[in-house]
Image (spheres, helix red, strand yellow):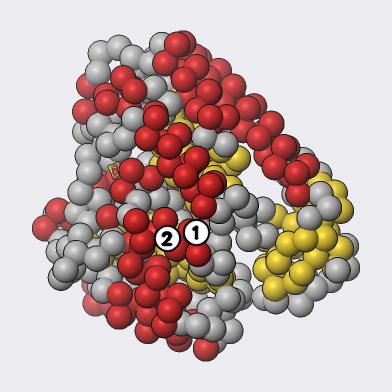
Amino acid sequence: MLPTPDNSECSRHTCAVTAEAVRKARQEIRKLRRENPDSPIIVTGCAAQTEPETFANMDEVTQVIGNTEKMQPQTWQQLAQGPNFIGTTEKVQVDDIMSVTETAGHLIDGFGTRSRAYVQVQNGCDHRCTFCIIPYGRGNSRSVPAGVVVEQIKRLVDKGFNEVVLTGVDLTSWGADLPATPKLGDLVMRILKLVTDLPRLRISSIDSIEVDENLMQAIATEPRLMPHLHLSLQHGDDLILKRMARRHLRDDAIRFTEEALRLRPDMTFGADIIAGFPTETEAHFENSLKLVTDCNLTWLHVFPYSKRQGTPAAKIPNQVNGTVIKERAARLRAIGDQQVNSHLAAQVGKTHHILMENPHMGRTEQFTEVTFAAPQAEGSIVTATITGHTGQQLQATNT
Ligand code: SF4
């Protein structure tokens, strides 16, 4: 919920990734209405883009705004006129996102803390994984030119940010629509070369099969590029990967993680994995379980498969039973917990450079949370020795 300064309007940003996310958005809208009986409620985001009628049919909702429209100042200027405008316009303002070709007009995706900024360098996706609704919410891939990104990051560093995270819906496709089709590795190298006083650069989720040579080079040679990669792997079985229309096979993922670890031994990996994709048998699923250790994955984002209307996977007749999906997701999470525990235990006694998010919590180069009993300066990078862990977080004292 994003109440306006005078609290006269509520806007709900929706996520379309899973059916559960849409259900929660609807639930929250009903709650918002109960708490704010007189405020207009405006719904935007990917679910508003892909299924505007779901929200337009709710009496609680005043207006449904698409992902392109939400970035246009006039949309909000008009809505700010209140009932005079809202009463005279269509309840749904959602254009065809596939016709959008301009790059993201908004570069800053968000500020994690005073010390870390998220910079969106790419939006949309040209792939059509069979389970995924995202391209219908975000449109085709568009990239922000490198010069614009570099200037933005320079400004952020001038303002005191110690870490920048590059984000995008399909980050590794960055550059494909730009002149000379540069790759993500070129962008990373350019940022590090031109913004010499940026202490830490991270990249968010990537598709390992699309990683270019320069990105591997940066992983090997650039200590300011943080050693943590979140991989969009989705499954560990080749047949299911093909049915998902993914572009990699199980061995590609293993080869990538082995090579990244060879180049950067302190690298850790996170990964998205879907449990219970249609037609998944126990044997297919066990290949996902094995992938976790074969790829040395530490942080798992486990998604119990949920049917998204309008996707090819939703039409596959052999859907997996809901109880089985939940049980498989729980098994994946359990192995994920073991991996986190091993990672945390292996850090005890090591020295890390920790970016403080608040006086008592910061994150290592690998993005692992660290707590301090004694307060530290927020936003600073503290050198500390790891003294223990809680099963979820590391504990440290200054060196
Ligand atoms: S690459 Fe990612 S965003 Fe694009 S369709 Fe596949 S899962 Fe969705």
- Using residue 304 as the reference point, say whether residue 67 is left or right of it: left
* 114 over 98 or under it: above or below: below
Residue 112: percent from left, percent from top: 56, 66
Identified by mark 1, the residue type is Ala
Q: Nearer the viewer, residue 51 or 4?
A: 51
Mark carried by residue 220: 1
* 15 over 63 or under it: above or below: above
Dot 1: within a 10 Å radius of its alpha carbon, few (fewer than 14), some, or many (20 or more) residues?
some
Which residue in the protein does label 2 denote? 217
Residue lying farthest bottom? 158
| Circle 1 SS class | helix
- Using residue 7 as the reference point, say whether residue 71 is left or right of it: left
Mark carried by residue 151: none
Question: How many dots with numbers?
Answer: 2
Residue 93: percent from left, percent from top: 20, 59
Looking at the image, can residue 99 be seen? yes
* Residue depicted at x 63% and y 60%: 365
Residue 47: percent from left, percent from top: 32, 47
Identified by mark 2, the residue type is Gln
Do the numbered discs 2 and 1 sit on residues whose CB atoms are within 8 Å? yes
Query: What is the quadrant of residue 35 in the picture?
Result: bottom right
Quadrant location of the C terminus?
bottom right
Q: Nearer the viewer, residue 91 or 351?
A: 351
